[in-house]
Image (cartoon, rainbow, N blue to C red):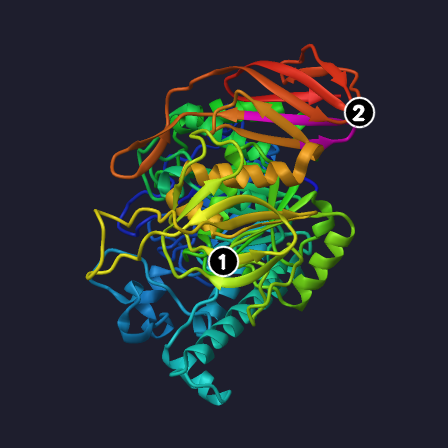
């Protein structure tokens, strides 16, 4: 990945056999000029699509019936001549042609519950890698390698899947496994996927060890380090308008950069999501999304879908060009830059909770609270290096095993700071494993409860509703930072008050959060709580503990940037780069989050720890700005942020 590209396009080309004259308007010179207009340096082109047809003369598959020349080869030649890289796409999990010709290759689910079994609905159908389909797919991959020797193979719609087709049921039986046992079926699905991965690796690498393989399964799980080796780089699919929203990529990148030096943020030019012909987002949105990728340590990949005639849409590449012209100017300050993070958040998803579970909302809450309060953080798994961080946060559901206990003890012994919340810090037997100066008593029977801060808050000292689960403890030797009260009673059909819950009962007040030395503990599931309800006072509680534990040791402090603003800090050779971003997002339609109007922000105050610099400059404008230096801190004011502003501290 020495030649990693920052300005990529993922060009979908899923084309029905019912459409005539495929590629009829492909023109090499026009194709090349359109890519230049878009400032594109890499474009993923198609060998085979979801419909199952190849876009080159093939001996092992069927070329699209209405294509009469080597479209793939022509695209690769056009790209090669102008120095644009061209990864090759092969649809792996979906092949509609073979789904109809070989129904025995279909992935089958219990009770027909998988909609991919439904042939009365216009949709693609999932195939099983434990059937003859794998042999066909491997032959297709090998043929592409032999004919074109691409820089990368992009394999789509893959992943571990449970299947109950005849072949899977028979093979499970041979291995002494039962398809009636869900755990056996899941384990067998993992074995099938690992075999698929190994075979793809064998086929590709025997032709060219340098060819990159990317297995696209959408979300890249944080709890499967055994699969990390199968991804030579990451492409993080995160189309904000397609249901992901604008905070999804923040979380994905926060983990990806701990695993890979090179990764992409994959967005789309569409108003909505994949498969959209004629959909466009506003250029300001694409400028923000690609700038966010740079700030989070990534390159960009913008999704497009080519018309069957084989002609790139000039309007689309004009849109892409508006974003990538900016990226091209900024690249000198981004290539080789590494993100600086003060805080490591041990991901709840990485502990085995499903990413859509209520527990995994703790990752969402942590990400939002830290970004909104302008903190620098990574999402890490339990194999991560704790010593890299000034503060480790373990949100809500981090059960201690021997490995986590040992790493935490060593981290605290070396002076690290730790913030626990909710059930984090408990082992499987319910014992509290960290000396936080408390005796843990268990979960509170009341829900909701009430929070009374013992520190300044926007709305002052009062009783704030706390919807998340609370945990009770006695203080042994710690400083109390907040208190709590229960409602008069839990709400039941026989006993309730008002529309939602009973008010706080002032007869009994108890401690709810403490700090002892390097350890802080909050007795609520505050991170999942913030990820679900977004109560401002929960963020205030989290921010108070982060401030109290980090103290004056934070790498950067920023003022006057709104809560939706993003701050990151990177290191590149002998300089640091501050990234400031802000865009106003709004909902359109039923649930589509978009960016249209740009609201500039002014006079952003920045305080940065470090040595006295020679100069501080706005880049890529190369305009020096005034700064002061005192007590190891560089202070300066950024006059204006219009979507994205970088500041180089030399």
Q: Is residue 356 visible?
A: yes
- Indicate whether 458 appears above or below 68: above
Left or right position of 319 against 192? left
The x, y position of residue 444, in whole percent, is: 43, 59
The x, y position of residue 407, in whole percent, is: 71, 59
Q: Is residue 556 magenta?
A: no
Residue at the image point whose x is 63% and y is 56% from the top: 476
Q: Residue furthest front?
A: 507
Q: Which region is colored magenta?
A: 570-580
| Depth order, front residue of 176/147 | 176
Q: Is residue 574 magenta?
A: yes
Residue at the image point whose x is 43% and y is 48% from the top: 529
Mark 2 and mark 1: Cα distance apart in space: 45 Å
Q: Which residue is mark 2?
A: 611
Left or right position of 441 against 93? right
Residue at the image point whose x is 56% and y is 37% from the top: 544
Q: Which residue is mark 1?
A: 472
The x, y position of residue 255, in whole percent, is: 58, 48
């Amino acid at each position: 990945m020495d030649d990693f590209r920052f300005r990529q396009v993922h060009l979908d080309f899923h084309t029905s056999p019912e459409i005539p004259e495929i590629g009829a308007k492909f023109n090499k010179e026009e194709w090349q000029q359109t890519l230049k207009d878009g400032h594109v340096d890499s474009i993923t082109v198609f060998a085979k699509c979801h419909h199952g047809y190849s876009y080159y003369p093939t001996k092992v598959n069927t070329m699209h019936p209405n294509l009469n020349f080597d479209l793939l080869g022509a695209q690769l030649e056009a790209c090669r001549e102008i120095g644009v890289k061209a990864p090759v796409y092969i649809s792996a999990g979906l092949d509609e042609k073979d789904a109809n010709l070989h129904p025995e290759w279909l992935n089958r689910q219990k009770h027909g519950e998988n909609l991919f079994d439904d042939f009365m609905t216009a949709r693609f159908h999932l195939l099983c890698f434990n059937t003859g389909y794998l042999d066909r797919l491997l032959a297709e991959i090998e043929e592409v390698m032999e004919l074109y020797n691409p820089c990368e193979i992009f394999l789509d719609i893959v992943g571990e899947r449970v299947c109950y087709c005849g072949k899977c049921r028979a093979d499970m039986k041979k291995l002494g496994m039962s398809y009636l046992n869900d755990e056996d079926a899941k384990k067998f699905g993992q074995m099938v996927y690992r075999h698929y991965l190994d075979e793809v690796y064998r086929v590709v690498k025997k032709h060219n060890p340098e060819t990159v393989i990317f297995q696209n399964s959408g979300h890249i799980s944080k709890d499967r380090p055994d699969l990390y080796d199968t991804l030579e780089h990451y492409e993080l699919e995160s189309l904000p308008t397609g249901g992901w929203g604008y905070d999804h990529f923040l979380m994905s990148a926060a983990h990806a950069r701990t695993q890979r030096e090179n990764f992409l943020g994959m967005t789309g030019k569409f108003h909505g999501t994949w498969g959209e012909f004629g959909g466009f987002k506003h250029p300001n949105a694409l400028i923000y999304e690609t700038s966010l990728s740079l700030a989070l340590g990534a390159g960009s990949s913008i999704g497009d879908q080519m018309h069957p005639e084989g002609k790139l849409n000039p309007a689309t590449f004009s849109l892409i060009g508006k974003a990538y012209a900016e990226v091209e100017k900024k690249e000198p300050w981004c290539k080789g830059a590494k993100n600086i993070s003060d805080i490591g958040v041990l991901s709840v998803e990485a502990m085995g909770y499903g990413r859509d579970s209520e527990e995994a909302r703790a990752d969402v809450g942590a990400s939002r609270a830290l970004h909104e309060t302008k903190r620098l953080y990574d999402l890490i798994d339990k194999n991560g290096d704790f010593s890299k961080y000034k503060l480790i946060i373990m949100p809500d559901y981090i059960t201690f095993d021997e490995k986590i206990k040992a790493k935490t003890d060593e981290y605290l012994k070396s002076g690290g700071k730790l913030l626990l919340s909710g059930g984090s810090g408990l082992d499987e037997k319910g014992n509290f494993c960290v000396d936080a100066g408390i005796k843990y008593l268990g979960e509170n029977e009341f829900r909701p409860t009430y929070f009374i801060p013992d520190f300044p808050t926007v709305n002052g000292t009062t009783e704030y509703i706390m919807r998340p689960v609370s945990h009770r403890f006695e203080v042994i030797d710690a400083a109390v930072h907040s208190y709590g009260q229960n409602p008069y009673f839990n709400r039941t059909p026989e006993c309730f008050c008002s529309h939602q819950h009973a008010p706080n009962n002032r007869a009994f007040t108890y401690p709810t959060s403490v700090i002892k030395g390097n350890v802080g503990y909050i007795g609520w599931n505050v991170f999942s709580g913030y990820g679900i309800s977004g109560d401002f006072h929960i963020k205030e509680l989290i921010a108070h503990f982060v401030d109290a534990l980090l103290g004056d040791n934070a790498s950067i402090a920023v003022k006057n940037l709104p809560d939706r603003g993003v701050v990151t800090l990177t290191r590149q050779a002998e300089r640091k780069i501050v990234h400031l971003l802000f865009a106003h997002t709004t909902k359109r339609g039923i649930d589509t989050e978009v960016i249209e109007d740009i609201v500039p922000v002014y006079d952003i105050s920045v305080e940065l720890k470090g040595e006295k610099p020679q100069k501080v400059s706005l880049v890529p404008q190369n305009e020096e700005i005034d700064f002061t230096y005192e007590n190891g801190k560089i202070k300066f004011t950024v006059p204006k942020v219009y979507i994205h502003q970088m500041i180089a501290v030399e």
